[in-house]
Image (spheres, grey):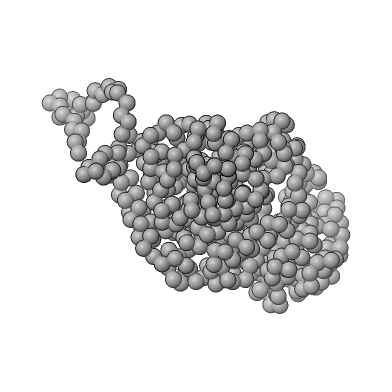
Amino acid sequence: MKTISRRRTTSRTPGRRWSRLRARVGVPDGSLTENGGLVLVAELDRALGVTAALDAGIGPVKARDRGLSGGEFALAMAVVQLTGEDHLVGFDRLRADRVGEALLPAPVPPSTTAATLATRFDQARREGIEAGCAQVTASALSALPVGERARVLAGRVTIDMDAKDVEVYSVRKEQVVRSYKGEIAGRVHAAHWAQTGTVLAADLLDGRSDGRTHAPGQVDRAVDAVRAAGATGPVLFQGDSGYYAGRVAEKIAVRGCLFRLGVPRSQPLWRAVARVHEDDWTDALDYPGAQVALLDYVPTGWPDGTRVIARRVRYDAAVLSADPRSRRSRTVGKDQLALVLDGIADTAYAYSFIATNENLDLDEEIAVAEWEFRRRTRIEELFRDTAHGAGLNHLPSGSHAVNSMWMWGALLAYNLTAWLQMLSPLDTARRRIATVRRLLIRRAARCTITARRHELHFTATAGELIANTLARIRAHRHLPAV
C-alpha cells in the first residue's frame, strides 16, 4: 500500500518543517464506500440467522416468490436507519453506495419500492418481526459466558412498558391525532427486556391511544417472546401510572408474572398515607431524604395479593409553587400544600405510589422494590436512542402501514446493536446506536480483489477495531445453538 510522504523543506523559518500537500479532486472511485462497517451486519446475519428468523416469523409478503422476502426487507429498513438515514430517500442513497450495498445479504430496494413493500406488512406480519427477534436473541445469548447466560435466562426477567409520542406536522397522516399536550402525534407503545436491552413488542397507534387498553395484548406477546428466547425465570412487568388498570394487572397475574405499576394520586391514597405510623417509614435507597412504607390500601378489583408502596420526600416551602402546572406541587397533598402556601407550615411531603403483587414483608425488600422501580430508565433510553440514533424522531409517510414499518426499522436497528454487542462488547456498558455507527458502521473503506477474494481496506484504527469485531462474530458461528 502506497503511503503519502511530505517533502521536507529547507526553509529556516521557525515552525515550518514540511510542505503542504497540493491535492486536486480526481475522478470518482467506484471501489470506495463510506459504509465499510456494513460487513459486520452481513456477518451478524450469517452468525445469528437474522434474515432467516425474520422470514420464519413474517411469512410470505408477496404472491410470487421473487424479489425481496419479508425478512430481507425488514433488515434493509433497519440498515438504512443504522447508517444514519432518517427518511425513505435513504434507501436511494444507500443504493448509490455500490460497495456498501454489495456487503449486505440482499439488495436494497428503491424508496418507492420500499414504501410499496411496507404497505404489505399488516399487524400479523409485524408481530412476526417480534417472533423473529426473539429467536435471534436466543441465538445471541448463547455467545455470552456461561455464568452470565444462566443469570439472564434463569434469573428474573424485567419487562418495562412505556409509550413515546412522535410529533408530526400534518393531520392528513393516517392514525395521528392531537395528544393531550396539543401535539399532532403518533404514539409508540413498546415492551422492553431490560436484561438483554432488546425490544420484545411494539405498536404504533394514535396520539391519544391509552396504554391501559393495549397493554394486555402486549403482555401476552412479551411473555411469549421471552419464553421463546429461552428465559425460564420469573417475569416482572413495570410501568408508570399510564398502565394503572385492574385489567392490566389481572392479565399480568394470569400469565403468572409480577407487576409494579405507578398509581395515580387519589383521595383514598391520601387517607391511607395518613394512617401510616411514623415508625413504619424506612429510608429509601440512594435517595437522601426519601422514605418508603407499605400502605394498607388495596385497589378495588385488582388481583389478590396486591399492595401499594408509598415514597415520600420532604421539601421546604421555598421550593413549592402555587402554580397548578408545577409538577412538584402536584405530588403534595392539597391540605399540606395549603398549609405551606399560607405560611403555617415550613415543610411538606411529596408522595409517589407503586402497586405490586410481590410478597414484600421486610423493610429492606420494600426499599429494594422502590429503588428498582425508580431506576427503570432503560426503556426511556430506548426511545431516546431510536429518536437520536435512528429515524424514530418523525413518521415519514402518510400511510400508517409504512410508518409502522419505519418504526420497526428503528427498533430493529436498536436490536441489531444489542446483538452485535452481545457477541463483541465495545465497552463495559452498552453503546448507543450513534456511537456504534461512528465506531463501526460508517467507516470509509476501499474494496479490492486479491486472489479472487474481496478485501476491505480501512484506516489503521478502524481496521483493527473492525477486524477484531469481525473475528468475534465469526467465532460465534462455531458455537452450538441453544
Residue positioned 26% across, 39% down in the render: 448
Give the residue drawn at x 44%, y 71%: 146
Q: How many marks?
A: 0
Instruction: Classify residue 286 by image quadrant.
Output: bottom right
Residue 241 picture location, percent across and down: 74, 56
Q: Nearer the viewer, residue 254 or 244?
A: 254
Task: Write the residue at 39% across / 51% down.
Answer: 43
Q: Is residue 385 above or below residue 98?
A: below
Residue 452: x, y in percent? 24, 43
The answer to whether residue 370 is seen in the rendering is yes
Q: Residue furthest front?
A: 64
The answer to whether one can see residue 295 in this image is: no
Position of residue 282 relative to residue 350, above or below, is: below
Q: Name the side, left or right, on which 163 lies relative to 24.
A: right
Q: Residue at x 73, y 68 (%)?
A: 254
User: Relative to residue 18, is residue 200 depicted above or below?
Assistant: below
Q: Is residue 370 left or right of residue 332?
A: left
Please identify the quadrant where the N terminus is shown: top left
Quarter assignment of residue 268? bottom right
Q: Could you say where residue 294 lies in the image, as x and y percent from the top left?
A: 75, 71
Which quarter of the picture shows residue 165? Answer: top right
Q: Residue furthest bottom?
A: 361
Q: Which sits in the foreground, 130 or 159?
A: 130
Image: 81 above or below 212: above
In x, y percent, where is residue 347? 77, 57
